[in-house]
Image: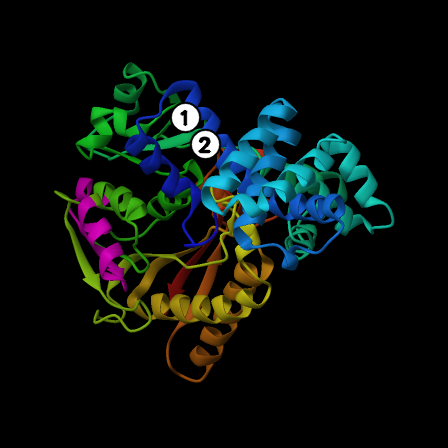
Amino acid sequence: MNGDGAYANLAMPALLRERRLTGRDAAFATELLAGTCRWQGSYDTIIVAAAGRPLKEFQPAVVDLLRLGAHQILAMRVPTPAAVAAGVDLAAATVGERVTGLVNAVLRRIAERNLDEWLDQLSEGLDDHDRLALRTAHPRWIVDAYAELLEPSELEQALAANNHSPAISLAVRPGLAEVDDLVRAGAQPSGYSPFAARWHGDPAELALVRDGRVGVQDEGSQLVTWALTKVDAAPGWWLDLCAGPGGKSALLGGLVALEGGTLDAVEPAEHRAELVRRAVDGLPVTVHVADGRSAPLPDAAFDRVLVDAPCTGLGALRRRPEARWRRRPEDVAELTRLQRELLAAAMRHVRPGGVVAYVTCSPHLAETVGVVAAVSRRRGKQAADGEGIAVEQLDARAYLPDVPDLGPGPAVQLWPHRHGTDAMFLALLRRSG
């Protein structure tokens, strides 16, 4: 389950098509994998209690088998005999007969209590954040990060929202398709983005997706991209400095084409750059394989720049359920350094009077307002020293007027439990001078 580092939301659709699973079988397999990945930390605590021994004494493959069995027993209402039998058979087939007795015994012990009973027992003596971490299946450090942004009354709701699989969000390519085209195909219009609709099922079933007129893209990603295009700025030359895999580039490319302008898209990894090329096929977009911090592009030249910076992804945990267990607190410092460097590069590339959108799919304060504040201070110091770069932060809420509860400003923070989107952050910065 965890051996090759794959993401469940990317691996599962391909596996379903390969095995030709549809309908209820596909839904069962999807929930089994996604739910087990999502709850694995809490299941690990239950497994240790049921087995009476630490996880390090089990083979990794056996731990995964026990997690799969625990999810069936505790969250999927699979009858205990069936879940245990399936776990034992899978253990025999993948690990060997020698572990079947152990798997049988531990799964039967897990089945002696329901999930709430296990969580009640194991929560005894824990402080509030450790209790929330266990009951909502999050590492403690993520609970702490969310708590810096949300009142206690909203914190558990926000964490719980990460445990609900979202509907698939689609985005029409401006000038190539309309939301009405998706509605006629059976999709449902979304609430905020004029490009969005929601789809239940495999998006590859839609001809509009197969021919490139529609892409899969979270509505929050659409909103923060769209907001950049609504700020008053000269038409012409736009830049996407962190373009892979291409969803935002496709939306920007479609919108800049309507204005008669062009977009440059930068992506350091060749395989992701190829995804960008496919996404923007037919649009006035030039793709560069380069590091956004040192891309071979002119300074003070672009009218709008998007920096969708690499981040911890704490805002997309409902889509990538295993990511919460793979990320570590120490990842934040390395990523914030990269984020600051990318935003500083964007401020170099944007022309005076132009606008930069700094975006992350993480609500973590260090990755959001911390990065914006650090770069704004540094740019302001350089301006005072005569280098001529000064930064004005705009109130981003003004460019999404129909979206409620965007936070105190001037930046925007979206949330799954408030808006039904990923927890996208947006800051809009105008270069003056």
Q: Which residues are magenta?
A: 256-278
Q: Which residue is mark 2?
A: 30
Q: How is the image coloured?
A: rainbow
Q: Amino acid at mark 2?
A: Thr
**Which label belongs to residue 18?**
none
Q: Is residue 395 above or below residue 176?
A: below
Task: Residue at 52% x, 50% y: name it.
Answer: 61
Instruction: Give the structural element (helix, strand or loop) at label 2.
Output: helix
Membership of 269 in magenta stretch: yes
Q: Are marks 1 and 2 in contact (CB under 8 Å)?
A: yes
Q: Position of residue 248 (x, y in %)?
A: 31, 46
Q: Which residue is mark 1?
A: 26
Q: CA distance from mark 1 to mark 2?
A: 6 Å
Front-most of 359 and 163? 163
Q: In this figure, what is the number of numbered marks?
A: 2
Q: In the visual, does 368 lie left or right of 274?
A: right
Q: Is residue 277 above or below residue 121?
A: below
Q: In the visual, does 297 lie left or right of 313?
A: left
Task: Residue at 40% x, 31% y: name it.
Answer: 168
Q: Is residue 15 above or below residue 354?
A: above
Q: Amino acid at mark 1?
A: Ala
Q: Position of residue 24 (x, y in %)?
A: 44, 19
Q: Residue furthest right?
A: 125
